[in-house]
Image: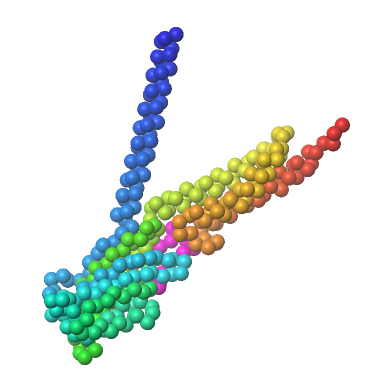
Amino acid sequence: MEGTARKLLGKRIILILLFLALFIGAFSSALYFYQNDRTQRSADLVFGDDKIPNRLDVDVSLLAIDPIKGELTLRFAPKPEGTYSTKEFYLTKDLKFFTGIESGKSEVTLEKNHIIDSVTGTISIVKGRVSDYPFDSHVSDLYIFFTNPKDEKEEIPILVNFYGAVSGYNVDADYIPKNEFQSTDEVKALRINISRSIITKSFSIFLMLAMWLIGLVIFTMSMVVLWQPRPIEFGMFTLIAGMLFALPAVRNLQPGVPPLGGLSDFLSFFWAESLVALSLPILFFTWLVRYKPPS
């Protein structure tokens, strides 16, 4: 008797240790994916020659991404260096700053003997379809340069520090190839590439699988009741009706999901909603046909 109890206890301890090891492995994997996603979704890049003493530095920060509207929100913070700056970081000459943002601030006048204020605005996404969610990718082009209104021929060197870190997205930036853009080196032409992060894609795929599972379970339950003489309970109707209205809420849990009609809807939501909607009349007519009047 004691030997049997010890064997049972040993098996329980082994199972507990096994589940604990699986939990630790899953938890470590989740942290690994988070760290990997965090490094991929941010961009901290420098464009230009920092060895040039007389130049203007521009810190470009990506503040927000809205693929549905097709816009990127950016903040530009210029800072003069060398002969363009006094000891108090005032500008030593009047300049014009071209940001490329699509508003009245696309061309900003920078006054002499003033500290340069930052400029915030939006630029359009030129390539990409949000309907491909969660596998969509987007591209936007950005052009930055300065001119001297009193000397149009003056070439003003600039150094661009690009910072892009928006939760849920992978952000990268690079020069626009010279065969697509012809200008002087003092014009910084950047191409910003954006895609969904690994976590966003994984969570969206998980919800798509969950919707498929819900639809298949409910449809299978209805077909089993139809083919086999199983009792039909009132709770089945409330379950199916509840799922019919719960699935749109599950669909909208996907981070940054676009309006109805995207790729994820054709992959899962429409199918799951159809299976649930079809199950309700099947169950109803089964209940109606099987009615037996009391004898």
Residue stretch in magenta: 124-137
- Judging depth in this view, the residue of 99 and 128 nearest the camera is 99
- Judging depth in this view, the residue of 78 and 34 nearest the camera is 78
Report the quarter where the N terminus lies: top left
Report the quarter where the C terminus lies: top right
- Judging depth in this view, the residue of 133 and 177 nearest the camera is 133
Residue 125 to residue 147: above or below: above
Residue 191 % position (x, y) = 32, 69
> Residue 178's image quarter?
bottom left
Residue occupying image coordinates x 55% and y 47%: 212
Can the viewer see residue 38?
A: yes
Residue 87 % position (x, y) = 13, 76
**Furthest-top residue in this view:** 1
Residue occupying image coordinates x 35% and y 42%: 29
Residue 254 % position (x, y) = 48, 55
Residue occupying image coordinates x 28% and y 64%: 163
Residue 65 in the figure: left or right of residue 92: right
Identify the main secondary structure in magenta: loop
* Residue 125 on the magenta span: yes
Residue 167 % position (x, y) = 37, 58
Residue 193 to residue 101: above or below: above
* Residue 164 on the magenta span: no
